[in-house]
Image (cartoon, grey):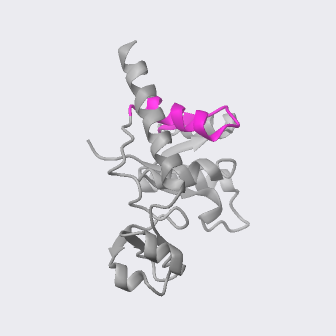
């Protein structure tokens, strides 16, 4: 099964970052070119269709319009990121796992590439360089952010485990 790609409306910026952290290809409404002659909803609907993405939105009218064009939509209702993440994972029967996490840049959505410890030496704080053994850099030349499994990785792993257990419970019922 091909891994789904997403497009998110402008109310879901935090969810966007989490989807990218979990390894999903996700683009954000605010990252789209939107000229004044076309409203953002129309741009989202057109881009969803053109790129075969799943639209994630909290906007009931936008969801309705997208569905009228036979586009796949997940309508979210919570203000809590983890609840929305659980909804996406369960509704689309997705698998969250640690192997897929950390493969996309949470800032710009480009793939991450492994870089050597030596190469990372002048790109990260000295303390981080001494404590970490694995580093990744965004492949986009305009971004090039460097990442490592720091203290935040514990929260990522906990979220993955929560999503796994949620998926199991949903599949058992």
User: Which corner quadrant holds the N terminus?
Assistant: top left
Picture layout, residue 93 above or below residue 145? above
Picture layout, residue 99 above or below residue 76? below
Residue 66: x %, y % from top left = 56, 40
Residue 136 showing in the rendered view: yes
Residue 29: x %, y % from top left = 62, 57
Q: Can you tell which quarter of the image residue 103 is in?
A: bottom left
Q: Can you tell which quarter of the image residue 111 is in?
A: bottom left
Residue 68 showing in the rendered view: no
- Identify which residue is drawn at 50% across, 73% down: 128
Q: Which is nearer the eye, 126 or 163?
A: 126
- Identify which residue is drawn at 53% across, 67% down: 108
In this rendering, position of residue 60 left or right of residue 15 = right
In this rendering, position of residue 29 left or right of residue 85 = right
Picture layout, residue 74 above or below residue 127? above
- Identify which residue is drawn at 66% across, 65% down: 34
The magenta stretch spans which residues?
Answer: 72-93
Q: Which is nearer the eye, 125 or 44?
A: 125
Q: Which is nearer the eye, 58 or 89?
A: 89
Q: Can you tell which quarter of the image residue 80 is in?
A: top right
Residue 38: x %, y % from top left = 68, 60
Residue 125: x %, y % from top left = 54, 79
- Identify which residue is drawn at 44% across, 68% down: 110
């Amino acid at each position: 099964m091909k891994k789904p790609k997403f497009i998110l409306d402008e109310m879901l910026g935090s969810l966007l970052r989490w989807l990218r952290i979990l390894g999903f290809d996700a683009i954000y409404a605010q990252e789209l070119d939107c000229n004044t002659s076309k409203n953002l909803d129309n741009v989202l609907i057109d881009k969803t269709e053109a790129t075969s993405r799943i639209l994630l939105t909290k906007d009931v009218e936008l969801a309705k319009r997208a569905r009228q064009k036979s586009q796949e939509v997940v309508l979210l209702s919570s203000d809590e990121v983890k609840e929305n993440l659980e909804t996406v994972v369960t509704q689309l029967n997705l698998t969250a796992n640690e192997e897929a996490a950390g493969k996309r840049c949470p800032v710009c959505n480009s793939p991450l590439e492994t870089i050597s410890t030596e190469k990372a030496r002048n790109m990260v704080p000295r303390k981080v360089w001494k404590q970490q053994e694995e580093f990744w850099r965004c492949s986009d030349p305009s971004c090039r952010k460097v990442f490592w499994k720091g203290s935040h990785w514990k929260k990522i792993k906990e979220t993955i485990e929560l999503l796994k257990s949620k998926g199991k419970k949903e599949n058992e019922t």
